[in-house]
Image (spheres, rainbow, N blue to C red):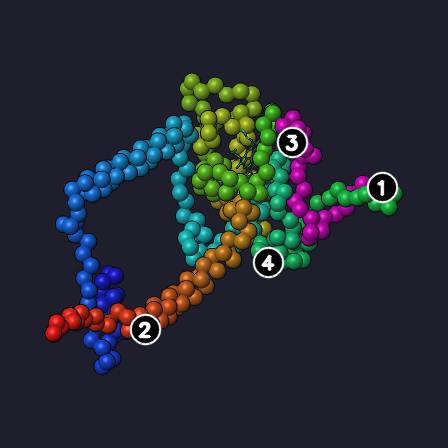
């Protein structure tokens, strides 16, 4: 491939301009000229390097294999791939699932209502969403704290005042903040989808404590979050049938957006960057051949001084 490209491009660029004849030098990579010790050293290095690499790989794999949890299946997400954007209808539905189900226990502290504008909601809709919640504010002129309806600049309020209250309400387990969970967990949205839809009866011999459920995708299997997604567990405003797997898909997409709100912009930049750099590369390549052509095609001749 590279040779073909070189032949096609090079032949034209280095065309004989009528002044100089291009001279071709051949560089050899054959090992014929190598000394015995050099060969020995290099092959030892190769074998040792390969061995160490294989050992590291095996160790890494064995660490992952010792976990008892099931590996989440990869789902065909709309945003999979370098040039794909998030499915915004799904992100909006995911917000509805968060609001109706997950919000009871999980905070989303790094997302504010203004982040929804032009992503899932119009500005007026986002304002209405914000106005539905009460935000603690203050102190006012008399030094008192008070509650007021939310504004676009407010962050999503947490369901519990602090971690201790959250633990007390959940059998001692802490429902983690979901803002970055899609990036924080191995498997990302695949893991979240598998976790939410993967609840089952515990296999024989796995003891569960009070308030725990069995989920093969959760490390250790015993999770302190009961199954929360069932068919019709939330209502969609766009009329999509709210099956458990649909809810899980939408909340997973929403949580990916929460973890990477800049995802679409980044993908757009990728497309622009690839376009720009491929043009630049072509120009730079041509320029390099142009500048070097004189040096590369000159002919050096050795002319012995004649003894008189
Ligand atoms: C009734 C409270 C409750 C609700 C509702 C709830 N969760 Fe949880 N969630 C928890 C608790 C408690 C934990 C901690 C579990 C543990 O550590 O054993 C948790 C943990 C999690 C985890 C982290 C698992 C891990 O790998 O550490 C994710 C992801 C999660 N919940 C997602 C969700 C989503 C998405 C929803 C909404 C569809 C939701 N939860 C609804 C209580 C809840």
Q: Do the residues labelled 1 and 3 touch (CB within 8 Å)?
A: no
Image x and y of residue 263, in percent: 51, 53
Which disc number belongs to residue 290? 2
State the residue at coordinates (41%, 44%): 75
Which disc number belongs to residue 118? 4
State which mark lies toward you, 3 or 4: 3
Q: How many residues crowd around disc 4 within 10 Å: few (fewer than 14), some, or many (20 or more)?
A: few
Image x and y of residue 118, in percent: 59, 58
Q: Quadrant of residue 82?
A: bottom left
How far apart, in angstroms, are the residues tagged by discs 3 and 4?
A: 32 Å
Which disc number belongs to residue 163? 3
- Outermost residue toward the front in this view: 308
State which mark lies toward you, 4 or 2: 2
How far apart, in angstroms, are the residues tagged by discs 1 and 4?
A: 37 Å
Q: Nearer the viewer, residue 292 or 69?
A: 292
State which mark lies toward you, 2 or 1: 2
User: Residue beneath label 1, please?
Assistant: 143
Q: In which quarter of the image is residue 102?
A: top right
How far apart, in angstroms, are the residues tagged by discs 3 and 2?
A: 66 Å
Q: How many residues crowd around disc 2 within 10 Å: few (fewer than 14), some, or many (20 or more)?
A: few
Q: What element carries label 1?
A: loop
Q: Which of marks 3 and 2 is nearer the N terminus?
A: 3
Look at the image and give the residue range highlighted in magenta.
144-168
Q: Which of marks 4 and 2 is nearer the N terminus?
A: 4
Q: How many labels does the image show?
A: 4
Quadrant in which the C terminus is drawn: bottom left
Image x and y of residue 234, in percent: 57, 42
Q: Does the magenta stretch include residue 63?
A: no
């Amino acid at each position: 491939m590279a040779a073909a490209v070189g032949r096609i491009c090079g032949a034209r660029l280095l065309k004989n301009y009528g002044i100089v004849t291009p001279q071709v030098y051949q560089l050899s990579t054959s090992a014929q000229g190598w000394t015995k010790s050099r060969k020995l050293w290099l092959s030892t290095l190769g074998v040792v390097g390969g061995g160490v690499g294989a050992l590291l790989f095996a160790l890494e794999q064995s660490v992952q294999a010792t976990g008892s949890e099931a590996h989440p299946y990869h789902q065909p997400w709309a945003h999979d791939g370098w040039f794909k954007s998030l499915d915004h209808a799904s992100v909006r539905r995911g917000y509805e699932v968060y609001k109706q189900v997950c919000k009871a226990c999980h905070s989303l502290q790094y997302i504010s209502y203004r982040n929804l504008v032009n992503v899932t909601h119009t500005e007026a809709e986002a304002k209405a969403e914000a106005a539905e919640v009460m935000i603690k504010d203050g102190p006012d002129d008399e030094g008192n704290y008070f509650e007021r309806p939310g504004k676009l600049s407010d962050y999503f309020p947490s369901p519990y005042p602090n971690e201790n209250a959250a633990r007390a309400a959940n059998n001692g387990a802490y429902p983690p903040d979901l803002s970055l969970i899609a990036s924080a967990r191995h498997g990302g949205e695949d893991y979240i989808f598998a976790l939410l839809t993967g609840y089952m009866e515990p296999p024989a011999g796995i003891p569960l404590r009070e308030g725990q459920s069995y989920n093969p995708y959760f490390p250790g299997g015993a999770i302190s979050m009961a199954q929360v997604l069932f068919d019709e567990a939330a209502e969609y405003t766009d009329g999509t049938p709210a099956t458990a797997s649909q809810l899980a898909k939408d909340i997973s997409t929403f949580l990916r957006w929460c973890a990477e709100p800049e995802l679409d912009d980044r993908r757009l930049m990728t497309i622009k960057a690839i376009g720009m750099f491929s043009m630049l590369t072509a120009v730079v390549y041509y320029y390099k051949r142009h500048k070097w052509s004189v040096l590369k095609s000159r002919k050096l001749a050795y002319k012995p001084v004649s003894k008189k």
